[in-house]
Image (spheres, rainbow, N blue to C red):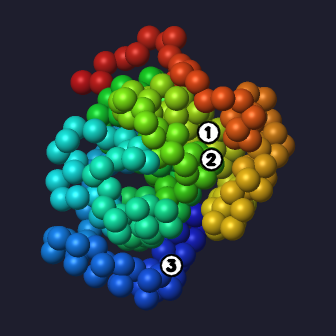
Amino acid sequence: MKRLFDVTAALFGLLVSAPVLAPVCIAVWLQDFHSPFYIATRVGRNGRKFRMVKLRSMVVRADRTGVDSTSGDDPRITRVGRFIRRCKLDELSQLWNVLWGQMSLVGPRPNVEREVAIYTDTERVLLSVRPGITDFASIVFADEADILKGHPDPDIGYNQIIRPWKSRLGLFYIQHRSFWVDLHLIFLTLLAAVSRPAVLNKIARTLERLGAEPDLCQVVRRTVPLVPTPPPGANEIVTSRS
């Protein structure tokens, strides 16, 4: 049922978004006369790598700088790219990946190989399902670039401050996933464009109803500061990745 819904919704989404994506693609191309798309390698279900389609929001060859995380003041982001990121238009292009079965509408966001390599064994459970365009974590940390703004090393900031909570939210989703939870998350993703504070409260209430720990709900509501935290399973013995 989930796969059928994904395919139907992806086809519909691509048709509806085409009038928006077409002029944006032209605007990206006119900036530097390079492809408006960026094909990003990501790690998907069962650790398989796939090519994720994104609207290009950075300068050409920005991925060769060796920095995976992006802060709000990242000089690699283009003028049109800031608009794309603010409106989350780069995620609409990922409907192609949903259509081809590499991603789902709802699921933990796919990560780069370099980040997956340092996952704890607990975090590797995130690879047991298809990665998604949206989930609890992608809504809660939609302001990731702002959180990392001004940090001397965005990658370190991401791994210490954001990754532990995103992983916990992703694992929580896997434990409680259902068709109705997916529909709820899609609705909240759309609603977040109108009122983000209201959506964060709704997510926190949903997590509480499903039995989430209090500290996770506090982070969702942003009632506690985001400080460096160990990722899930940080004290376990990590098995070899070879």
Task: Looking at the image, tell me whether mark 1 or mark 2 is earlier in sequence order.
Answer: 2
Q: Secondary structure at mark 3?
A: helix
Q: What amino acid type is highlighted by mark number 3?
A: Gly
Q: Secondary structure at mark 2?
A: helix
Position of 191 with respect to 79 (left or right) is right
Task: Looking at the image, tell me whether mark 1 or mark 3 is earlier in sequence order.
Answer: 3
Q: Is residue 50 visible?
A: no
Image point (73%, 53%), residue name: 197
Q: Is residue 87 visible?
A: yes
225 is higher (above) or lower (below) than 221: above
Total marks drawn? Answer: 3
Q: Quadrant of the N terminus?
A: bottom right
- How far separated are the C-alphas under marks 1 and 3? 26 Å
161 is higher (above) or lower (below) than 166: above
Q: What amino acid type is highlighted by mark number 2?
A: Val
Image point (29%, 34%), residue name: 114
Q: Position of residue 203 (x, y in %)?
A: 74, 49
Mark 2 and mark 1 in contact (Cβ < 8 Å)?
yes
Question: Is 77 in front, or is 172?
Answer: 77
Task: Looking at the image, tell me whether mark 2 or mark 3 is earlier in sequence order.
Answer: 3
Q: Secondary structure at mark 1?
A: helix
Q: Quadrant of the C terminus?
A: top left
Q: Position of residue 98 (x, y in %)?
A: 43, 66
Residue ID for mark 2 = 140
Mark 3 and mark 2 in contact (Cβ < 8 Å)?
no
Q: Position of residue 99 (x, y in %)?
A: 41, 71
Q: What amino acid type is highlighted by mark number 1?
A: Leu
Image point (69%, 67%), residue name: 194
Residue ID for mark 3 = 13
Residue ID for mark 1 = 169
